[in-house]
Amino acid sequence: MSAVLEPPAALGPRGAASAGPFRPAEWNSVGLVMVAPYVLVFLAFVLYPVCYGLWLARDPASYARLIDDPVFFRAVINTALFLLVVVNVKFLLALFLSGFFVHERAWIRVLSVIFILPWAVPSIPTILSFRFMFNPEWGIVNSLIFRLTQLDGPNWLNDRWIAFTMAGLVHIWKSLPFWTLILVTGRLAISKDLYEAAAVDGASGWQRFRWITWPSIRNLYLTCTILSMIWTLGDFNSVYLLTGGGPSDLTHVLATLGIRYLRLDQLDMAMATIVIALPFVLPLIYFMVRRLSKGPGED
């Protein structure tokens, strides 16, 4: 008897038998099972809180009261200073330090481990320790100043600009190791042959940085700067734990201003503060996604 030949099953784009126009039925079931936990977490902890917050901030009167509050305008100015000054100073330092820590010496490797500790340890005890150190009455900094000069130290956290500067320095101290490490990895990805060829041609250290290092890590540097700005907008630890927004609510940023309204039992204004921050966040997210979507070699 001759065997009855059946037509072969339709093959998908990778040679797998396809039960439907896209994927086998078992693939659809497994995919739904695997995606379901993520979808539930996304709906419960991302979409629902965002929608609920927008619903709480739906009243235009909340925005009118927010704009009439002088603390709000000071918070906007402080937030802009954090984004334009503190973040850029942090990345200039990270760029400089990455060139130091990229050297392959034993003592530099040991120093790099110590350098990364501020980022690795929890924020609350470290920032509160700074608050205790700079206490104008019994802090260790003013105590040392008095012992050495017989003069009283400044009120570090009771002056607006000194307290705001200290919050910026604490933010830099806390997050600088992480971004330095990222830029170090970018430098290590550059071929050493380029530096050797430049050294043979007599290029100086500045010329090697200008024509080899910077073109190679420029996209990484700009992408990390935008990402840091997005994270800084939501960072309230550096300001809230160090100054509490004081003195007299002069050092608040938008992230801590919402906490202030929550403590005053003004939930609608707290949510309005978050909505007001969206014009800061959305352009940064747009440029971030646009840069990440570009192919290699694109500017």
Image (cartoon, rainbow, N blue to C red):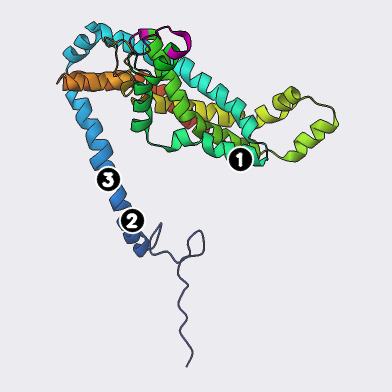
What is the spatial separation of the Cα atoms under label 2 and label 3, in whole angstroms? Answer: 12 Å
Q: Mark 2 or mark 1, which is nearer the start of the sequence?
A: 2
Q: Which residue is at 81% across, 35% downward? A: 197
Quickly name the residue at label 1.
109
Q: Nearer the viewer, residue 221 or 30?
A: 221
Q: Mark 3 or mark 2, which is nearer the start of the sequence?
A: 2
Q: Residue furthest left?
A: 265
What range is drawn magenta here?
A: 147-160
Secondary element type, mark 2: helix
Quickly name the residue at label 3.
41
In this picture, residue 227 sits left or right of residue 35? right
Identify the disc placed on residue 34.
2
Magenta stretch, overall SS: loop
Q: Nearer the viewer, residue 9 or 242?
A: 242
Q: Position of residue 246 (x, y in %)?
A: 29, 13
Q: Residues within 10 Å of mark 2 (few under 14, many from 20)?
A: few
Secondary element type, mark 3: helix
What is the spatial separation of the Cα atoms under label 1 and label 2, in whole angstroms? Answer: 42 Å
